[in-house]
Image (spheres, rainbow, N blue to C red):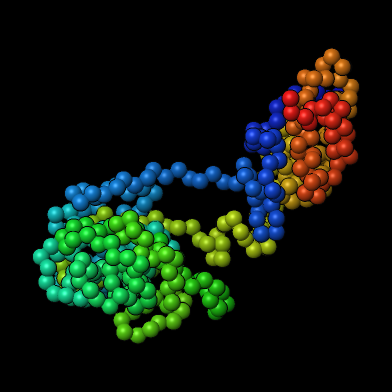
Amino acid sequence: MKTNLLIAICALPFPAALLHADGAFYGDPPDAVHPWAIHDMNRPQPPRVEPATFSSQEKPGTPPSDAVILFDGTDATLGNWISDKNGEPTKWVVKDATLQCVPGSGYVRTKDEWADCQLHIEWSAPSEVHGDSQGRGNSGVFLMGQVEVQVLDNHGNPTYSDGFAGSVYGVNPPMANALRKPGEWQFYDIIFRRPIYKDGQLVDAGYLTVFCNGVLLQDHTPLQGGGGHKARTKDRPFPDKGPLKLQDHGNPVRYRNIWYRPLPKRAIDGGDTSVMSAEQTAAKRAEIAASIRDKAAKMEGKEKLLHLLESLVYAKDAGATNEATAMADAFVADVKATPADKIESRKGDVTQLNNALQYLEKWKIADFAATGEVLQIVKAREWDKKK
């Protein structure tokens, strides 16, 4: 059995998942609130999303591949919208591939409901200018039906600043006036996060980030209850989900190219992130360790040994420790028995295992008797020195 173990240990390469520019076991390890190591190859890869294409004045761009399309200029996507008054089909119309407000018909809202999102929406105030202040090209984009990002023709048209185009209405003015002329298309890109309450207590006020025509207008602006007309609002819970609403303010404002991407939950709301609570981190680390042990169970030799050692970085496990101890001891015995004229061929194997064992010792993760012996071999052969 011991001979077979030695043969198996020496036969297989080190696992690619552990290899970095400087060898195995690379960055600072997980800690009490970070479930992954720095530069951790076990951390999930970002999903591939085909990016959006940019819009022009003449033609809207295309949404990213994972976007939910709310309006693309077709009559079919008009069916995504209903009257906010009574839930009946909207009286807003599709005209020249745009969704146009019919003054007096009331707000429209989406049938779909969601919460945290990235929203893209393009709008155009009438090219023929009528009125001033709030009476000129007025509409609004209501996230979850609760918080308004103001739509208004403010090109040479002053108004109260917390009701300016790109304001969080009644809460915060935009940092700039980035509007094009009336009749031209304005592009809003919005990041929305709803408020989070736990046990009746506010733990995250929620916020909006808004770009207009590529210019940052709102930078992580707290919602302060959502804002509104004339009355100051206070922090309050929001529903779990809500629709997107577009305002009828008596002006024939046009919209096009409306889409959103749902955003993952924040850690404070039960989602994954780089920093978690101690409880969340411990659970995630145990999950990662178990996954690595499951992979190790299907392996043999060095690949299995390194996976067992790797699992210990995330969570202690007596079975993994005992098995790795036996395999590491057998590895050392085999290296010591290697003839002098062949020992140089073992350099890569030995230095790689040494990197792993030194990492575990440095961070006080695990202490193996083989650690000192492998280091002695490395130093005796001067394999730790760059040549």
Residue 284: % across, % down: 65, 54
Q: Position of residue 313 (x, y in %)?
A: 73, 47
User: Residue at the location (46% across, 70% down)?
Assistant: 206
Q: Position of residue 280 (x, y in %)?
A: 64, 60
Q: Residue at x 72, y 32 (%)?
A: 303
Q: Please indicate, yes or no, whether residue 244 appears anywhere in the rendered image.
A: no
Which residue is nearer to you in this view: 81 or 209? 209
Give left or right: position of 247 versus 356: left
Side of 233 where 184 appears, left or right: left
Q: Nearer the viewer, residue 365 or 181?
A: 181
Residue found 55% across the figure and 79% down from its top: 200
Query: Split into 4 quadrants, where in the image is the C terminus?
Result: top right
Spot occupied by residue 40 in the image (x, y as percentages of width and height): 63, 44
- Is residue 135 rendered to the left or right of residue 207? left
277, above or below 11, in the image: below
Q: Quarter-wise, where is residue 99 in the image?
A: bottom left
Tell me: residue 254, above or below residue 387.
below
